[in-house]
């Protein structure tokens, strides 16, 4: 079984991003700037935010994290984001999820200006993606497409099953698969016989957020399996939505957790930030 490791892809990509970053600096006379907005102290979010910042700095970007207490009023955070939207020195803005319960996701989605929305969660991006128009693509599904391309996994004409329909992974993933000419089966928590669906898939992409949901019996022989799930086990290790040892006996290729989808997500975030920066420069 082929392990779809992110490292060879991200190494190459990071070299290209660092070079493009130097080009941007020579044109703009400043580094591209990514600001992450962190509300509260969710431990996983604190770690993810730190990792994004470290990667941004290692590529030559400027990075800032704006921290608000979990008790912050949504209006206060919104007003700060509005000022970031208007700041010509800020290229990319990312609101770290999950947000405290006082924040309404259906409102927050509209806060970041689409031209700086490097997470690509603004409804305008999802709409454009669904219509096959140019847009920022959410980092996790975009990273999965790059990973599949690197390993020359065929998509056109294949049956792709996506488990999960979140706005950040499942839905954009389905749109990308459709655009790449796969036949798409889209599953969610109301799918009555999940196994019957997943077993049809040449390409199975699992983003359900349920540890070990997919065992070997859900996988068609020689399918390619992409595991998006990330879970911390009681032994403090990372695990996915797919039971790796069982699945590895049946699949022809599979992403490990960690080392598969996660690093691709961060790499694509950096790429979106750089695109946003060049976009600002071209429109200034
Ligand atoms: N590696 C990365 O970079 C990365 C990035 C993002 C997320 N993640 C991880 O990926 C996982 C999914 O994230 P998310 O934000 O998409 O999660 P989410 O918003 O919780 O969505 C989960 C989706 O899975 C569906 N689902 C849940 N249980 C199911 C079941 N038993 N059968 C079929 N479908 C089921 C849900 O269906 P309904 O819509 O019907 O509720 C929902 O659409 C999480 O573990 C998250 O930590 C990883």
Image (tube, rainbow, N blue to C red):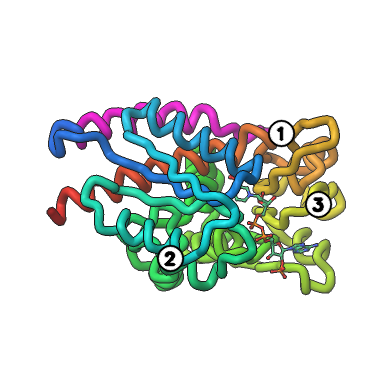
Seen at 23% across and 45% down, the residue is 89
Of labels 1 and 3, earlier in sequence is 1
Residue ID for mark 2: 122
Residue 272 to residue 236: above or below: below
Residue 148 to residue 157: above or below: above
- Name the image quarter holding residue 26: top left
Of labels 1 and 2, earlier in sequence is 1
Whole-percent x, y for residue 177 in the image? 53, 60
Q: Which residues are magenta?
A: 2-24
Residue ID for mark 3: 214
Magenta highlight: main SS: helix
Whole-percent x, y for residue 250 in the image? 80, 42
Whole-percent x, y for residue 101 in the image? 64, 64
Q: Is residue 125 left or right of residue 72?
A: left
Whole-percent x, y for residue 200 in the image? 74, 61
- Depth check, mark 2 against mark 3: the one in front is 2
């Amino acid at each position: 079984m082929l392990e779809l490791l992110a490292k060879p892809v991200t190494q190459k990509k990071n070299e290209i991003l660092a070079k493009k970053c130097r080009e941007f600096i020579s044109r703009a006379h400043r580094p591209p700037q990514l600001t992450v907005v962190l509300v509260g102290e969710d431990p996983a979010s604190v770690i993810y935010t730190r990792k994004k910042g470290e990667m941004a700095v290692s590529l030559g970007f400027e990075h800032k994290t704006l921290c608000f207490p979990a008790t912050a009023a949504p209006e206060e955070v919104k007003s700060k984001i509005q000022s970031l939207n208007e700041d010509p020195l800020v290229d990319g803005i990312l609101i770290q999820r999950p947000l405290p319960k006082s924040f309404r996701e259906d409102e927050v989605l509209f806060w970041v200006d689409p031209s700086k929305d490097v997470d690509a969660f603004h409804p305008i991006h999802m709409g454009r993606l669904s219509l096959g128009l140019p847009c920022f693509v959410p980092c996790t599904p975009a990273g999965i497409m790059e990973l599949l391309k690197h390993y020359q996994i065929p998509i056109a004409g294949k049956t792709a099953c996506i488990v999960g329909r979140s706005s950040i992974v499942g839905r954009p993933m389905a749109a990308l698969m459709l655009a790449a000419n796969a036949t798409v089966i889209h599953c969610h928590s109301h799918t009555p016989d999940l196994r019957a669906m997943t077993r049809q898939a040449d390409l199975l992409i699992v983003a359900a957020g349920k540890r070990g949901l997919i065992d070997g019996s859900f996988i068609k022989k020689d399918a390619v399996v992409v595991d998006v799930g990330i879970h911390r086990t009681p032994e403090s290790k990372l695990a996915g939505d797919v039971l790796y040892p069982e699945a590895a006996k049946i699949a022809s290729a599979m992403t490990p957790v960690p080392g598969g989808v996660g690093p691709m997500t961060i790499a694509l975030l950096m790429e979106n930030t750089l695109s946003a920066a060049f976009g600002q420069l071209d429109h200034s």
